[in-house]
Amino acid sequence: MKKFYYLESCSTCKRIMKELKLADDVEMREIKSSPITALEADSIAGKVGSYEAMFSKRAMKYRSLGLHEKELSEKDYRRYLLEEYTFLKRPVMETDNRAVAGNSKKAVAEMKSLL
């Protein structure tokens, strides 16, 4: 199983998708029209190490909700991830054993290794 979670309106996601040249065996998941489920969030978090590791602190809502001024727990990160698609650090590549979240050069290189 290989899944790729992305946001259709995100130019960075589109660039990375082109760079990865994703094969037909990769399940594509657009997170705005089809948000991640609790089971998917739990699976990804288990593979990346924590909910915080898959949480985007660069999302506009992070500051507008005042979350940057709070000390968030793993439970809080999980709740926000499930409530609002924009908090998912994207893109995310998930396989049976591993997941990689984010768009850094290192993250993209790791995604390539999963293919």
Image (tube, grey):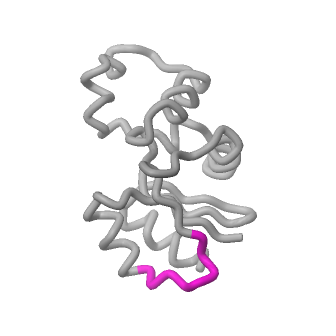
Quadrant of the snapshot with the C terminus: bottom right
Residue visible at 52% across and 71% down in the picture: 111
- The residue positioned 61% from the left and 59% from the top of the image is 99
- Quadrant of the image containing the N terminus: bottom right
Write down the quadrant of residue 23 in the picture. Answer: bottom right
Please say whether residue 21 is one of the residues in the magenta stretch: yes
To which quarter of the image does residue 79 belong? top right
Q: Which residues are magenta?
A: 20-27
Q: Where does the image place residue 62, in percent across and percent down from the top left?
A: 32, 28
- Residue 28 x %, y %: 53, 68
Q: Position of residue 78 (x, y in %)?
A: 57, 30
How many numbered discs sit on the rendered protein?
A: 0
Q: Is residue 17 above or below residue 65?
A: below
**Residue at left offset 60%, top offset 66%:** 3
User: Which picture quadrant has residue 15?
Assistant: bottom left
**Residue closer to the observer: 14 or 109:** 14
Residue at image point 54% right, 59% down: 100
Image coordinates for residue 93, horizontal then vertical, percent:
55, 64
Check if residue 66 falls in the magenta segment: no
